[in-house]
């Protein structure tokens, strides 16, 4: 037998829901919360955040995916079709993409590990090969440019901010205010 959609499944969750409801009423009335009410409200907010996070993971708009990848929709759709990774279409289901990506890597591990593999020589749209990105000076792995400079919220320059002097940072902050 399944629980009703509006009621929690177990007794502890039902008790929590009563505490949460009481806590919300108190918050709205600007009353002080008891310790158990604060704890229940905190648990509820954490669980709600987790539920929403997974919901959002399953429906990333392609616009956001294009911004994160730095690729045009045409390239994304061609790669999705060519490699069988489900990131084409109007929205992206991130858990499915992650599974497909790891399956692809596992299925092609031997091919990707060979140094004479044409895939490693690069002929893709970016003009860079995986070998070029992973082999830097002296055989050291180099950091690939993961995000284009115009991608909001993503920056390859983050470490540089910490290396600046305080006065330089202050002048940059002052310029934005």
Image (cartoon, helix red, strand yellow):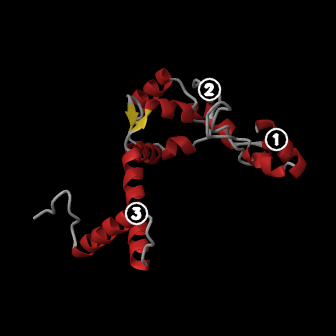
Q: Which residue is at 42% across, 28% downward? A: 82
* Residue at 67% across, 40% down: 155
What residue is shown with label 3?
Answer: 29
As helix, strand or loop, the secondary structure at mark 3 comes to loop
Tell which of 120 and 25 is nearer to you: 25
**Whole-Å distance between the Cαs marked 2 and 3?**
57 Å
Quarter residue 93 falls in: top left
Distance Cα–Cα, label 3 vs label 1? 40 Å
Q: Which residue is mark 1?
A: 174
20 up-or-down from 89: above or below: below
For label 2, count other residues whose C-alpha is less than 10 Å away and answer few (under 14), some (14-19) or many (20+).
few
Count of numbered marks: 3
Q: Nearer the viewer, residue 74 or 122?
A: 74
Does residue 21 lie above or below 155 as drawn?
below
The x and y percentages for residue 39 are: 42, 74
Q: Residue 177 appears at what percent x and percent y?
A: 76, 39
Q: Characterize the local packing of mark 3: few (<14), some (14-19) or many (20 or more) Cα atoms within 10 angstroms.
A: few
Compare marks 2 and 3 and give the one earlier in the sequence. Answer: 3
- Disc on the earlier residue, 1 or 2: 2
Mark earlier in primary sequence (3, 1): 3
For residue 20, which quarter of the picture? bottom left
Where is residue 68? Give x, y as percent.
55, 36
Camera-near label (1 vs 2) is 1
- 8 sits to left or right of 59: left
User: Could you classify mark 1 by the number of other residues whose Cα lies within 10 Å: few (under 14), some (14-19), or many (20 or more)?
Assistant: few
Instruction: Answer left or right for 152 relative to 14.
Output: right
Residue at the extreme left of the image, as rendered? 1
Disc 2 designates what residue?
126
Q: Which of 148 and 12 lies nearest the eye of the viewer? A: 12
């Amino acid at each position: 037998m399944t629980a009703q959609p509006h009621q929690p499944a177990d007794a502890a969750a039902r008790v929590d829901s009563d505490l949460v409801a009481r806590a919300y009423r108190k918050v709205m009335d600007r009353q002080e919360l008891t310790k158990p009410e604060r704890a229940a409200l905190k648990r509820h907010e954490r669980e709600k955040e987790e539920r929403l996070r997974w919901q959002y993971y399953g429906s990333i708009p392609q616009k956001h995916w294009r911004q994160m990848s730095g690729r045009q929709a045409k390239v994304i759709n061609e790669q999705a079709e060519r490699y069988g990774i489900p990131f084409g279409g109007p929205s992206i289901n991130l858990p499915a993409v992650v599974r497909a990506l790891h399956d692809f890597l596992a299925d092609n591990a031997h091919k990707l590990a060979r140094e004479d593999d044409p895939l490693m020589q690069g002929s893709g749209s970016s003009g860079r090969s995986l070998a070029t990105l992973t082999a830097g000076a002296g055989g050291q792995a180099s950091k690939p440019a993961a995000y284009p400079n115009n991608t909001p919220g993503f920056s390859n320059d983050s470490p540089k901010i910490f290396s600046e002097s305080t006065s330089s940072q202050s002048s940059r902050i002052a310029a934005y205010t």
